[in-house]
Image (cartoon, grey):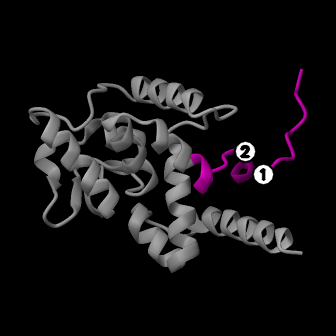
Amino acid sequence: MVLPRDPTAAWDKRQPYTEEEVGRLLQVADPTDRVLVLLGAHAGLRASEMVALAWGYVDLDAATVRVERGKGGKAGVVHLSGTTVEALQAIIASRSVRGFVLPFRSTQRAYSRIQRLAERAGLKRGKGLHALRHYCGTRVASEQGLEAAQQHLRHSNLSTTQTYAKWRERIRIKEMVAQW
């Protein structure tokens, strides 16, 4: 039996967190959860990159992290927000920092952590870790354009970044209509 094709566009099924949702996640986050959220929502790291991030690749003075094995095995440097730097400094102040930045050794554990955090934040359902990256891409695309989003997220091809333009436009239309 062949099921009918779902007419919903793939990009429409994977919605980013909203600004309000990210704020609610950060409100209920402990220091580790805060870093988890910000590495996705501000740095735009993928779940596997968050889990694999070692302290040796964090440069707080330069406000950057080096991703050694990104998608396709590519390395790259990612700029950090001031908020993310502060969150990382809070972890340094509270414990010994050797090895990995986050205590989760699998993406599944990190995913479970964000789901529990979403429940604590009162969100209807967590959207997962990758939705934080989508939030980041949408925000960068809105503020600086698609080329900046492509560079920040380390996409090889601009067509991969086009999804963020669709989300950006949907947000703009929502804001415009809300003012009517």
Which secondary structure dominates the residues rendered in magenta? Answer: loop
Q: Which region is colored magenta?
A: 1-21
On the image, the x and y values in percent for residue 88 come to: 23, 47
Q: Which residue is mark 2?
A: 13
Query: Looking at the rendering, in which quadrant would you find the N terminus?
Result: top right
| Secondary structure of the residue carrying numbered label 2 | helix
Q: Is residue 99 left or right of residue 149?
A: left
The residue under the point 42% across, 55% down is: 44
Q: What amino acid is at disc 2?
A: Lys
Q: Is residue 95 left or right of residue 134?
A: left
On the image, the x and y values in percent for residue 109 come to: 40, 23
Q: Is residue 17 magenta?
A: yes
Q: Is residue 81 above or below residue 7?
A: below
Instruction: Check if mark 1's residue and mark 2's residue have beta carbons within 8 Å.
Output: yes
Residue 127 can be seen, yes or no: yes
Q: What amino acid is at disc 1?
A: Ala
Q: How many marks?
A: 2
Q: Is residue 25 above or below residue 158?
A: above
On the image, the x and y values in percent for residue 172 come to: 73, 72
Residue 17 can be seen, yes or no: no
